Amino acid sequence: MTYFNVNVNIGQSGAGQFLFASLPESHQCRAVSRASGKNAIRLSAGYSELNPVFQIEKEIVRVNASENALLRAYRQRPVAITAFCVLGILAIQALFLKLMGQTTICDCGTVKLWYSDPSGPETSQHIGDWYTYSHFLHGLLFYALLWLVAPRLPIGIRLALAVGLEAAWEMAENTPMVINRYRESALAEGYYGDSVLNSLSDTAATIVGFFVARISPVWLSIVLVVATEIFMAVMIRDNLTLNILQLVYPSQTISNWQVGG
């Protein structure tokens, strides 16, 4: 038995590539099913040695009812379902921060595109700051993680999962326990949590990082992670690695170095 691919057009069901199994002894072919929305297209084809033209017969059958409802809906409207999931997660994230008492925007009453002082009172209150780079790296890393553990999931579902992971991070770091833990670091002594605007902007940076990883070769993503970590360490004496280290296991030596001691 041999296998080969054939491109076919089937009315309103559209074009698709099907894997056919050739059975030389009977001059017949069988085709595997291809999912198409809530249905599947099942094909059979026959040919003869004198007239090697495929005669296509179509049969529409219901997809296995055990298939995940979200995946079925995603196949029908991938962009809409992805947008719905992402926006829903962002809404939950914003609501959680408000319930935790975080401000919508900076208490100063202004909205800045960029705030440059990494240890200033308005860090984590505006649209962008030095830690936006760290959240960009989240996107690269979450893409890699989901590529490793769930490579067969559609890209839109993986994006929604990445946003969910980032939202979970954002919500966790704005709980009193984590805020107080951050404040043990020399650079975060004045930290009192993120504004809703800053938190959502951080998640947007993660989405950008996810798409950059999507279109970049692996080596470029690795270079971006390493270069960004070095850049942040040189510029503000902090980065994603040090941030996590100081959160999990605070080091006075690192704190002294961060304040120039």
Image (spheres, helix red, strand yellow):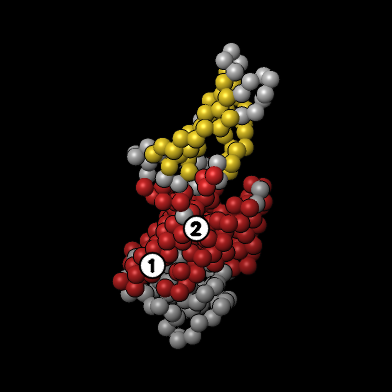
Give coordinates of residue 34: x percent, y percent. 50, 37
Give coordinates of residue 253: x percent, y percent. 51, 60
User: At 52% across and 28% down in the image, what residue appears?
Assistant: 44
Nearer to us in this view, 150 or 225: 150
Q: Which mark is residue 79?
A: 2
Q: Nearer the viewer, mark 2 or mark 1?
A: 2
- Find the residue positioned furthest to the left: 99
Give coordinates of residue 170: x percent, y percent. 42, 63
Residue hosting label 1: 91
Nearer to us in this view, 148 or 254: 148
Nearer to us in this view, 69 or 149: 69
Amino acid, disc 1: Ala
Amino acid, disc 2: Val
Tell me the element at label 1.
helix
- Relative to 59, is 68 above or below? below
Tell me the element at label 2.
helix
Q: Are marks 2 and 1 in contact (CB under 8 Å)?
A: no
Nearer to us in this view, 25 or 63: 25
- Count residues near mark 2 (Cα–Cα under 10 Å), then give few for <14, some for 14-19, many for 20+: few
Which image quarter is the C terminus in? bottom right
The quadrant holding residue 101 is: bottom left
- Count residues near mark 1 (Cα–Cα under 10 Å), then give few for <14, some for 14-19, many for 20+: few
Query: Count the marks: how many?
Result: 2
Q: Which mark is residue 8?
A: none
Q: For the residues marked 2 and 1, what is the alpha-carbon distance in whole angstroms? A: 18 Å
